[in-house]
Image (tube, helix red, strand yellow):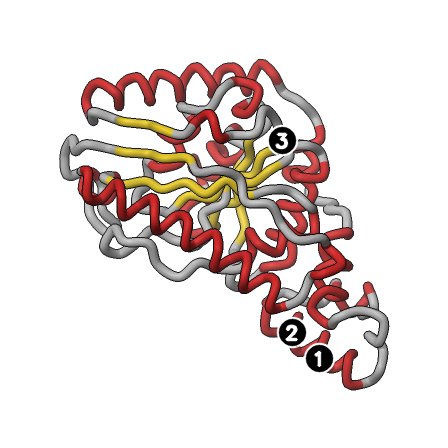
Amino acid sequence: VEESRLAEIYTVRELVELVRESAMAGTSQALRPQFAGWHTVLQGESADPEVLVLAQPQRTVEGFWYLLTRMAAMFSYDRFQLRATGLENLPPHGPFLICPNHQSFIDGVIMSGLLPWPVFRDIFFVGTSEIFGAGFMRRLARWMRIMVVDPDANLIPAMRAGAFGLRHGRVLIMFPEGERSIDGTPKTFKKGAAILSIHMQVPMVPVAIEGFYKAWPRGKGFQGFAPLQIRFGKPIYPPPEAEASEDAYEKLTAELKAQVVAMWQELHVET
């Protein structure tokens, strides 16, 4: 697949159609179509200054947010009766992905406040323009290292931003569902985390959260204090990049979801 053609791609559908077209024309004989496409896409460097910041440590800003999120976590232990387990499963430092199910606006903040400093200082997020697209939320995104994208209309920059951060030793917090659950139960997991894991050769840490939906459900305001639980699972390591294929993406995504759902079901029973 030619780089000039890849630069014009903005959705998964366009990527798949282009790779299929190239395969039919005999230009992808040496590599599997999906492997060739994503390998090329993720090797591309971003020119976005908000993404390039990921290569530059900002310890003062990182320290400020660390203290703020730690305070949020301590508050949650008291008022939300927060219970967190499995933190020992986290790798000591990046690069890797943290992949939780998604229930509420406050998921990321409280979960981040549980992370040890060597991990926290390297975290970054990929957030949607629907929430962080303008005004104060846009400025907040810059301060918190949230790469703002529209994943449905502009997928390639989102994936490249994730790859850039991981390439520089960062820790990507990525919600595989891509949106908050409508009822608190884990929904369909998208393949983005698995694609990054395979092509960047970094592990994924599955995380299950429960209780956040009761506290602040999608489409409603804050409902009150409810018991919160977070469980970190053991890292899932990807197969070699040479084995990348659509089947490999789907298999790794299924494994990630299975582990998250299994932990979530345990937490749901305990709540």
Q: Are marks 1 and 3 in contact (CB under 8 Å)?
A: no
In this view, the residue farthest toward the left is: 224
Q: Which residue has dot 2 on it?
A: 16
What is the number of callouts on the image? 3
Quadrant housing residue 55: top right
Kindly identify the amino acid type of the residue bearing the numbered disc 3: Gly
Q: Is residue 71 left or right of residue 129?
A: left
Q: Where 248 falls versus 25 (above or below)?
A: above
Q: Is residue 160 left or right of residue 187?
A: right
Q: Which residue has dot 1 on it?
A: 20
Kindly identify the amino acid type of the residue bearing the numbered disc 1: Arg
- Label 1 sits on a secondary structure element that is helix
- Label 2 sits on a secondary structure element that is helix
Q: Are marks 2 and 1 in contact (CB under 8 Å)?
A: yes
Quarter occupied by the N terminus:
bottom right
User: Which disc, if any, is residue 94?
Assistant: 3
Within 10 angstroms of label 1, few (less than 14), some, or many (20 or more) residues? some
Quadrant housing residue 248: bottom right
Residue 212 rendering spot, x and y as whole percentages: 25, 39
Q: Find the distance from the CA under tag 3 to the CA under tag 2.
A: 30 Å
Residue 133 visible somewhere in the drawing: no
Within 10 angstroms of label 2, few (less than 14), some, or many (20 or more) residues? some
